[in-house]
């Protein structure tokens, strides 16, 4: 019995380490399949889920999410990755100059949006817009990513989750035919979306 309590403590530390600080961030950037796949590669990201947010409609679905954007919910360990790093990777995987949609997906559902929960996240979001403006060499007014107060996140249907992994050929065909990577390479430069190119 005297060994039972230490075992419980060790087990609880393994399940929920003290140095893990989980945070959530909601981002919209066109097709949620693509954004989910692009952000999962970053060290410190625990999970990325596809869903809907930004509107007032309750229980939105893929067939009806009027007023919402397609978004991803990014759960990350802030001890391993910073919010600014995530936002830089996000910016590098969208077209921040296009506020009418993203690539072949047009309309309100596909607008790029950074949802913030507090003043700190709002400030980080503004910094990301300024950084994108500087890197692209355009006035800040040309950056068309909206900053919006965070609302409820609605999880998308199961068949949308991890779509790139579960439907690899269909995903690659969609991504290529939509011109996403071609436009990103033209905008940011070849291989500029690699997570290893960061330098302040």
Image: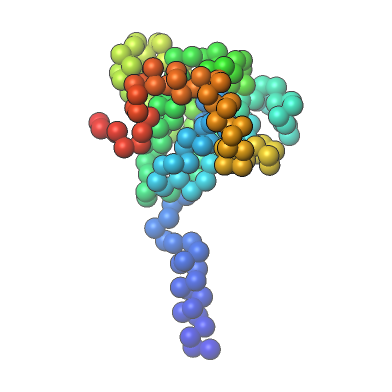
Image position of 163 (left or right of 135): right
Report x, y in % for residue 137: 30, 13
Farthest residue to the bottom: give it: 1
Image position of 139 (left or right of 177): left
Q: Is residue 152 visible?
A: no
Report x, y in % for residue 30: 55, 24
Q: Residue at x 41, y 42 (%)?
A: 42
Above or below residue 141? Residue 109 is below
The residue nearer to you, when weighing 126 against 44, is: 44
Above or below residue 58? Residue 134 is above
Report x, y in % for residue 76: 46, 45
Choose top left, top right, bottom left or bottom right for residue 131: top left
Above or below residue 134? Residue 83 is below
Q: Residue at x 47, y 73 (%)?
A: 9
Q: Quadrant location of the C terminus?
A: top left
Q: How many marks?
A: 0
Choose top left, top right, bottom left or bottom right for residue 191: top left
Scheme by which the image is coloured: rainbow
Q: Residue at x 74, y 25 (%)?
A: 64
Report x, y in % for residue 63: 74, 26
The residue nearer to you, when weighing 46 against 113, is: 46
Q: Is residue 5 visible?
A: yes
Q: Residue at x 44, y 27 (%)?
A: 93
Image position of 60 (left or right of 190): right
């Amino acid at each position: 019995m005297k060994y039972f309590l230490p075992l419980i403590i060790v087990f609880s530390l393994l399940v929920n380490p003290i140095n893990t600080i989980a945070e959530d961030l909601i981002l919209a950037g066109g097709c949620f399949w693509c954004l989910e796949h692009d952000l999962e590669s970053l060290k410190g990201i625990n999970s990325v889920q596809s869903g809907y947010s930004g509107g007032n409609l309750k229980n939105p679905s893929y067939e009806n999410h009027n007023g919402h954007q397609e978004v991803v919910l990014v759960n990350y360990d802030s001890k391993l990755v910073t919010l600014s790093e995530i936002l830089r990777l996000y910016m590098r995987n969208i077209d921040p100059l296009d506020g009418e949609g993203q690539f072949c997906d047009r309309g309100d559902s596909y607008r790029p949006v950074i949802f913030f929960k507090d003043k700190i996240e709002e400030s980080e979001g503004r910094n990301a817009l300024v950084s994108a403006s500087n890197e692209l060499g355009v006035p800040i007014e040309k950056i068309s990513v909206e900053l919006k107060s965070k609302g409820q996140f609605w999880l998308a249907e199961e068949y949308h989750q991890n779509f790139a992994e579960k439907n690899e050929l269909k995903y690659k065909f969609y991504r290529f035919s939509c011109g996403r990577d071609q436009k990103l390479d033209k905008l940011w430069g070849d291989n500029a979306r690699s997570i290893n190119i960061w330098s302040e």
